[in-house]
Image (tube, grey):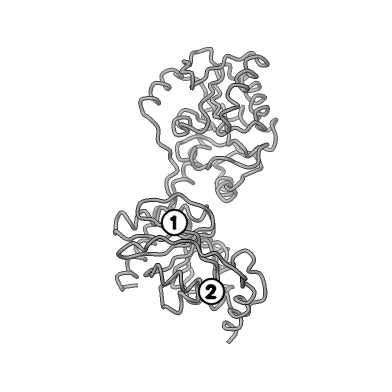
Amino acid sequence: MAYSLGLTLYNLANRREAVAVPDRPARPAGRLVWMHAPGRDAARSLMELSRRLYEEDGVTVLLTCADPLPGRTGIVVQPPPSDLPALAAAFLDHWRPEIAIMADGELRPALLHEVILRKLPLLMVGARNPSFPRGGDGWFPGLMRGLLAEFRAVLTLDEPSARAFRKAGASPSAVEVTGKLEEESAALPCLEAEREALTRQLATRPVWLAAALPEAEEGAIIAAHRTALRLAHRLLLIVVPQDATRVGPLMQRMEKEEGWSVARRAEDEELDTETEVYIADAGSEFGLWYRLAPITFMGGSLGGSGCLRDPLEPAALGSAILYGPRPGPYGTTFGRLGAARAARAVGSATDLAEALGDLLSPDRAARLAQAAWAVASDGAEVTERVLTMIRRIMDGDG
């Protein structure tokens, strides 16, 4: 009774006068699994799970997420439907999934109620905290408890998360602490011939990278490099500006105000022993620069509007990470890196200079980079466990 009342109140509170229904592509032939992530961070691990299902089992995956995501072969990426009964029914009528897998802890009541009516198996993975979508706050008696009771398995990140799900209504026998799933690899490619050529030019020089550097942070990077050069006079700074139009002005500033020797990759200027700054093309070849630089500063995180690149990119390629207090869309990722002591936070240009000087010690940078690599590559056993669970359910053994 309480569940029905809660669902009714939720549907009344969530009504829309007019809702645009997005055009949906045709449903692919064959078996299909539906996975849902509330945001980009949760979607990363579902992408890897989806890739494995498609490549190893030939199962197409429908991945819904509120944030835009790039598509992959065998993975249909769509926004979730508005959480209204009629739209939820139309969504499931169109896609006809065999199983529904939720991530993080978001519960969309109208949609999940329709899933339950159709007796689709329900799993929750990477579970942090049970919640309704944004705007779903209110008094909905019995609703969360009734929904969570229908999940066959709730695989949580840690024990506090497990307690939160048990308290909210998940069956104690269904809740298990497994940790995070393996994420899609963030290791970017590069041309090996280019890497080898630049490695020879650099020889044993210390190198650091400012990745996707916005204009607002140029002064901080210049100040940090100026200070660090006093500690390591052979130090090379590689800069990848956020904006291609800043390449020329930044080069002039460094040459005229600092007296540095600056080379520009776009002009095919060679690195030599006197080069102190190497300015790369905006937005290109990050896989190359992360491999060459043992230390990476994440542009946009200090004085910009938020971090502009995924910090798991340098982490996956063995570069130690420096970042400021503005994570942008990567707050969860930086939280994981920070908890693992796998990245160094800085609060100001002065902090950046001090942290850079500290990481010029190769053993310190290596420890940070190793911890970051572990964060970027963990979760393989959990992903294998979830794959086995999905396969058993789809084969009728679960």
For the image shown, how many numbered marks are present on the structure? 2
Foreground pick, 147 / 70: 70
Percent position of residue 74, x then y: 35, 55
* Residue at the image point whose x is 56% and y is 64% from the top: 161
Quarter that holds the C terminus: bottom left
Q: Which secondary structure, mark 1?
A: strand
Q: Label 2 is placed on what type of residue?
A: Ala
Percent position of residue 303, x then y: 68, 36
* Residue at the image point whose x is 57% and y is 83% from the top: 4
Q: Which residue is mark 2?
A: 110
Horizontal side, residue 127 vs residue 227: left or right: left
Horizontal side, residue 60 vs residue 274: left or right: left
Q: Label 1 is placed on what type of residue?
A: Val
Q: Which residue is mark 1?
A: 77
CA gap between label 1 and label 2 equals 21 Å
* Residue at the image point whose x is 43% and y is 68% from the top: 100
* Residue at the image point whose x is 46% and y is 77% from the top: 116
Q: Is residue 1 above or below residue 110?
A: below
Q: Residues within 10 Å of mark 2 (few under 14, many from 20)?
A: many
Percent position of residue 162, x then y: 54, 66
Foreground pick, 41 / 152: 41
Residue 203 is marked as: none
Percent position of residue 376, x then y: 47, 45
Q: Residues within 10 Å of mark 1 (few under 14, many from 20)?
A: some
Q: Which secondary structure, mark 2?
A: helix
